[in-house]
Image (spheres, rainbow, N blue to C red):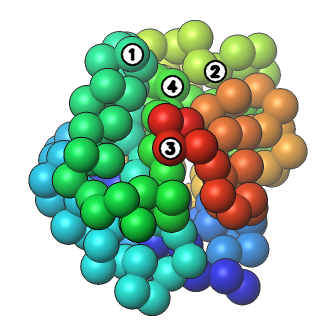
Amino acid sequence: MKKVGLVVEDKHTEVIKEIGKKLDIKPIIRRQRGRINVRKASAFAKELLRSCEKVIILGDADCDERRERERLQRIYEHLPEGLRRSVHICIIVHELESWLLADENAISRVLGKNVKPVKNPERIHDAKEYLEGLFEKGGKKQHLPAEEIAKHVNVEKLREKCASFADFERKVRNGNVRRRDA
């Protein structure tokens, strides 16, 4: 199992760990409260590269993929040239919950009721709210069990329905990418 460093938003840590297991990686995660801070992410990337072969900075687009991509691209400005080749940017469209919505079977298993498939989960701008609505309609108004859904998710469905997940998986599995491959 290869070590991959991940810089993620605080709320994603446990879900990303579960998805990492399915991709046969041992993620070493540094989390940030709220949105990823460019300066802190740069420092985390430098630290993680001491023990990991690569680092992926994983941010939510939050309905503005272009702006988030530009914002996170500035991380490269804070990295020494020699490290840039090992740091990759991935943007989740629109929220991590979009990835979970890709697998209706995982949701159904956790909910205890069948749910309809979502054809294109990356078109749902507030995927977390949508997923919470499914659980509320199913009679479960508790905290959204995103980690539990992630334990059951089928990565083939994620790859098929979510281009941002396919990009993440490609960067996890492959070595180097272009400098501006954000």
Disc 4 versus disc 1: distance between alpha carbons? 11 Å
Q: Is residue 40 left or right of residue 14?
A: left
Residue 141: x percent and y percent? 39, 38
| Residue tagged 2 | 121
* 105 vs 120, nearest the viewer: 120
Badge 4 amino acid: Val
Residue 43: x percent and y percent? 20, 67
Label 1 neighbour load within 10 Å: few <14, some 14-19, many 20+: few
Disc 1 versus disc 2: distance between alpha carbons? 18 Å
Is residue 90 visible in the rendered image? The answer is no
Q: Nearer the viewer, mark 3 or mark 4?
A: 3
Q: Earlier in the sequence, mark 1 or mark 2?
A: 1
- Disc assigned to residue 93: 4
Q: Quadrant of residue 129?
A: top left
At horizontal 66% and vertical 75% (from top left) the residue drawn is 25
Local secondary structure at mark 4: loop
The mark total stands at 4
Disc 4 versus disc 2: distance between alpha carbons? 9 Å
Label 4 neighbour load within 10 Å: few <14, some 14-19, many 20+: many
Q: Earlier in the sequence, mark 3 or mark 4?
A: 4
Quadrant of the rendering where the N terminus is positioned: bottom right
Residue 42: x percent and y percent? 24, 59
Q: With respect to residue 16, does 44 lie above or below?
A: below
